[in-house]
Each structure stands twice: as C-alpha cells, then as structure tokens.
Amino acid sequence: TDGEAALKEALTENYDVILLDEMMPKMNGLRVCQAYKAQTTESKPVIFLSAKSQESDISEFYDHGAGFIPKPFDPMQLAAQIEKVLNQR
C-alpha cells in the first residue's frame, strides 16, 4: 500500500525477489531499497517498476537493484525479468 509497508514486509517476510514501484506514498522505491539494504545482511534481488524512463533514473535503479521494468509492462516481461534475476543468483 505504501513504501513503509513495503519495507516492513521486505524485512519480516521471506521473499525470493523484491518488486518495488518507484512511486509509492510515504517512501519511494529507491528509499525502500536503500533502507532495506541498510537494515539486513540478506542480498535479495530488487526489481524496480517505474514509468520514469530518463537515463539517469534507469541508471539509479540498476545501481541499487538487480533489474528495471518500464511501466506499463507486459506480464510476460515481468516473468522473464524475475526468471533472469533468479537464475543469476
């Protein structure tokens, strides 16, 4: 529902991959990712979903996460990106 809830879920639940929308209430996806990495030693891959498509935004997503999918997206593209990230682990 919002970035704070996403951070709490990421820290307390066991996920193989974390999907974060960049534009969320309370905390954006990048802030959630940074806080998550600062509060845990686990290295779960993070994939960002965003309508932001400037090169600087995309570069920042890859600096902090394992993947980026531009919105709107095809569900098959999402599945392929998740599979790719999990296979790289």
Image: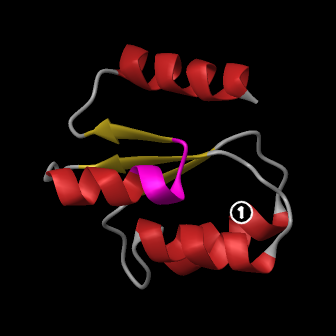
Seen in the picture, residue 70 relative to 30 is either above or below; the reply is above
What secondary structure is the stretch in magenta mostly built from?
helix
Residue at image point 71% right, 63% down: 10
**Residue 46, how many percent across, how many down?**
58, 49
Quarter that holds the C terminus: top right
Residue 2 seen in the current view: no
Q: Which residue is mark 1?
A: 10
Is 88 left or right of 34, judged from the image as shown?
right
Q: Secondary structure at mark 1?
A: helix
Viewer-nearest residue: 30 or 21: 30
**Residue 62, how many percent across, how many down?**
43, 49
Residues rendered magenta in the picture: 62-66
Seen in the picture, residue 87 relative to 57 is either above or below; the reply is above
Residue at image point 69% right, 25% down: 88
**Residue 25, how many percent across, how many down?**
36, 78
Determine the residue located farthest toward the bottom in the rendered image.
26
Residue at image point 39% right, 41% down: 68
Seen in the picture, residue 44 relative to 24 is either above or below; the reply is above
Seen in the picture, residue 73 relative to 28 is either above or below; the reply is above
> How many numbered discs sit on the rendered protein?
1
Other-residue count near label 1 (Cα within 10 Å), few / some / many at <14 / 14–19 / ≥20 = some
Residue 77 placement: quadrant? top left
Residue 73 placement: quadrant? top left
Residue at image point 48% right, 77% down: 31
Residue 57 among magenta residues: no
**Residue 45, how many percent across, how many down?**
66, 45
Residue 48 seen in the current view: yes
Residue 63 among magenta residues: yes
Is 4 left or right of 12, judged from the image as shown?
left
Is 2 left or right of 43, judged from the image as shown?
left
* Residue type for callout 1: Ala
